[in-house]
């Protein structure tokens, strides 16, 4: 069984940018979601994946990710409609760990989240100065919540 142990944080300032070693443009689409699981399709460079993730319990959840043909991913992304997120993932090594700083575009423009994947829930690490409040368990920082809130706000502004 594949486990993902991840912690998420808000980002403070731009000091992280001077430590970026790689960037990746990602498109994530939510194909299906219920209370216990979600299915996500991702497209990046000349690769694509399909992931099934269980509900997170704290910072831990089951995750199964498989490579799929890029053409299939593009077709699946079209099925996602407005539930597609675009972001630049910045790889930032820091004191023996790798941080992923996601800078969102499109509907989520302006949101910047830092994530760190850990081998266990008890792994210790030093937080860089540009890492702010932890939002791992805060439902307001789940992508689906952020996206639906922004889309609803846009629809209200367009109507009124």
Image (cartoon, helix red, strand yellow):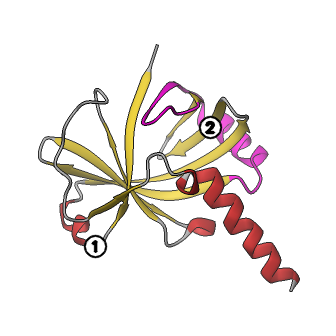
Q: Is residue 67 magenta?
A: yes
Callout 1: SS: loop
Residue at image x 49%, y 58%?
A: 87
Can you give x and y, in whole percent of width and height, for residue 24 in the image? 40, 52
Mark 1, other Cα within 10 Å: few <14 / some 14–19 / many ≥20:
few
Q: Which residue is mark 2?
A: 40
Residue at image x 34%, y 65%?
A: 11
Can you give x and y, in whole percent of width and height, for residue 57 in the image? 50, 31
- Against 109, residue 95 (above or below) is above
Q: Which residue is mark 1?
A: 14
- Against 117, residue 158 (above or below) is below
Q: Which residue occupies the foreground of this view, 147 or 70?
A: 147
Callout 2: SS: strand
Can you give x and y, in whole percent of width and height, for residue 71 in the image? 66, 38
Kindly indicate the quadrant of the structure image that contains residue 118: top left
Residue at image x 82%, y 81%?
A: 158
- Against 144, residue 156 (above or below) is below
Kindly indicate the quadrant of the structure image that contains residue 31: top right
2 and 1 marks in contact (CB < 8 Å): no
Q: Is residue 60 magenta?
A: yes
Q: Which residue occupies the foreground of this view, 86 or 33?
A: 33
The residues bearing labels 2 and 1 have C-alpha atoms spaced at a distance of: 29 Å
User: Which residues make up the magenta segment?
Assistant: 55-83
């Amino acid at each position: 069984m594949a486990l993902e142990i991840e912690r998420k944080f808000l980002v403070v300032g731009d000091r992280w940018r001077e430590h970026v070693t790689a960037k990746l443009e990602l498109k994530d689409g939510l194909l299906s979601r219920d209370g216990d699981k979600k299915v996500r399709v991702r497209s990046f460079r000349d690769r694509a994946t399909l992931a099934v993730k269980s509900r997170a319990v704290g910072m831990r959840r089951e995750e199964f990710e498989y490579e799929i043909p890029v053409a299939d991913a593009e077709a699946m992304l079209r099925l996602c409609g407005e539930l597609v997120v675009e972001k630049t993932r910045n790889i930032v090594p820091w004191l023996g760990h790798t941080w992923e700083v996601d800078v969102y575009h499109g509907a989520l423009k302006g949101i910047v989240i830092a994530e760190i994947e850990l081998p266990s829930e008890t792994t210790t690490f030093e937080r860089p100065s540009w890492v702010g409040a932890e939002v791992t368990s805060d439902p307001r920082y789940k992508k689906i919540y952020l996206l639906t809130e922004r889309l609803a706000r846009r629809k209200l502004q367009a109507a009124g």
